[in-house]
Amino acid sequence: MRHMKNLALVLIGLATSTSSFATVDALIDYTIIHRQLQTDDYCYKALPMWAEIGIPAASQMAGTMAPTRTFKQNSLGNSYVNINEISRVPGLKAEYINDTYDEQTGVYTYSMRLDASEHPAIGDASPKARQAIVDQAKFVLLAMNRNLAQYYPGKYRLWFTVEGLPTQAGLNGTPLPAKTQYPYTAQSPLRIAFEKELINLTGSCR
């Protein structure tokens, strides 16, 4: 617990730094979305990363978008596999825009852009292909909220812009807006709706 508190202070210190050259190596956690093998439920999973941190949330974002190298033990031969549903089908590109930390309120704000225009299924107009792209983008949004909540619980704001999404007409679930009037937070109705639709928080993911 002491380690987590000290790390949080380091991250907040970096977030408030005005120097673009202020970096530190640190082991931090980031979030991926994986599929539970026995039930096919989608779950959050926190993984460690060795980060050269200038902007902590940007380091987490890079981890969230990257494939994992998860050790797979098998009697026929061991291997490493990617269990991150966000990167299992490549094509989404995440970009840092800016971030701010309000020292008076303790609120951290992170702005990012997600581009789906180069997704390999973007030319497929079938509902199945469009659903997969939109759900994958929602996974990024949910994982980034989880990342920010880890070090700024209850005091983060996420501006999340999406470009290149296919039409969502006729798809299941709450539509993902390209841009919202307000930032996403832990209490955001949209974030909560996406999470209820896609993540099993009470069953096999616990």
Image (tube, helix red, strand yellow):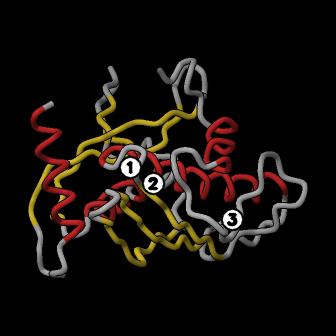
* Quarter of the picture holding the N terminus: top left
Question: Looking at the image, which residue is at 61% across and 48% down?
Answer: 191
Q: Amino acid at mark 2?
A: Met
Residue 38: where, in percent of width, then height? 55, 19
Q: Would residue 149 be found to the left or right of residue 50 on screen?
A: right
Calculate the distance from the C-alpha at mark 2 to the C-alpha at mark 3. Answer: 23 Å
Q: Which residue is mark 2?
A: 144
Residue 52: where, in percent of width, then height? 15, 64
Calculate the distance from the C-alpha at mark 3 to the C-alpha at mark 1. Answer: 27 Å
Q: Which residue is mark 3?
A: 121
Q: Would residue 21 be found to the left or right of residue 110 on screen?
A: left
Q: Residues within 10 Å of mark 3 (few under 14, many from 20)?
A: some
Is 38 situated above or below 131? above
Q: Amino acid at mark 1?
A: Asn
Q: Amino acid at mark 3?
A: Ala
The foreground one among 96 and 87 is 96
